[in-house]
Amino acid sequence: GVSSVEELNETAYETATFTEYFTSQVARIGEKIVVRRFATLNAGANGCVNGYVHSNGRVGVLVAAACSDAKVAEALAPMLKNVAMHAAAMKPTTLTSKDFDPAFVEAETIGRIEAIKTENEELARLKKPLKNVPQYISASQLTPEVMAAAEEAIKAKLLADGKPEKIWANIIPGQLARFVADNTTLDKELALLDQNYVMDDSMTVAEAITKEAAKHGGTAEIVEFVKYEVGEGLEKKVDNFAEEVAAQMA
């Protein structure tokens, strides 16, 4: 139940503290090794937690799902391992788009739009089809006001195209779905639940979990995940050989 490395180091382990035990084990290896970070996942009474460590030992993922009952939790365990493998390969940084820092989304929006515009200039020069330039890149930006404006724009286009108003109800939902898909590219790249599931890319990870739970007569939802990769968050020293030689000659 500890929540920090400092607390962990002071907990009792066998006949000493954890840090004393750990230090004695590291001494046998002869390398400098310290506990830098850890995470604890709790999916609740009917939850399930499973994970995956890549064969090279450099990437590890844990995934936690809250389930409707113990039967579903037990049945979902193999799939959670597959989702953990998915996360190891696709490298999501958040669970959903709601977890993005607004400042990050704003900066990414500007950068991605400018990149597409620059790419379109080259495509135009080559007389190739241009890419769609989105207004947004994340569901976190698609407020009710934005969606209402998008629907009005769709209606205006249908009217301009001479489409009978009686068939608009059949067309608008599909075009709104396309609008959302075109304007949530960041989510598809970095939000786990919004990524296309590598085992079946016709579904998102969230949809795949829902479908699997339904097969066993219940519901499930991924509530948390953690992905650790060796070296993450560590500052790497960059040596400038020329400066090093100059300093020795001075």
Image (spheres, helix red, strand yellow):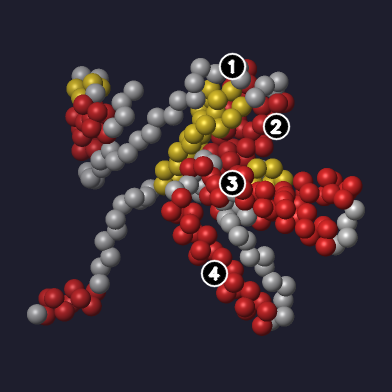
- Helix, strand or loop under label 4: helix
Which residue is more in the foreground, 88 or 161? Answer: 161
In this rendered view, identify the residue nearer to me: 80 or 22. 80
Q: Amino acid at mark 4?
A: Glu
Residue 139, position in %: x, y? Answer: 58, 47
Element class at badge 2:
helix
What's the distance in space between the residues labelled 4 and 1, CA to CA?
49 Å
Q: Which mark is residue 189?
A: none
State which tag comes first along the sequence, 2 or 1.
1
> What residue lies at 26% left-to-right and 61% top-to-bottom?
237
Q: Name the residue at 65% across, 24% down.
A: 219
Residues under numbered marks 2 and 3 in contact, where contact means CB atoms less than 8 Å apart: no
- Name above or below for residue 99 compared with residue 13: below
- Mark 1 neighbour class, 10 Å CA radius: few under 14, some 14 to 19, many 20 or more: some
The residue wearing badge 3 is: 143
Q: Is residue 241 above or below residue 101?
A: below
Left or right: residue 104 versus residue 13 is right
Q: Which residue is mark 4?
A: 114
Q: CA distance from mark 4 to mark 2?
A: 38 Å
Circle 4 packing at 10 Å, graded few (<14), some (14-19), many (20+), is few
User: Residue 211 bears which disc, if any?
Assistant: 2
The C terminus - image quarter = bottom left
Amino acid type at mark 2: Lys
The answer, for residue 177, to whether it is visible in the render is: yes
Q: Which residue is mark 1?
A: 70
State which tag comes first along the sequence, 4 or 1. Answer: 1
Where residue 157 appears, as percent x and y from the top left, is: 79, 60
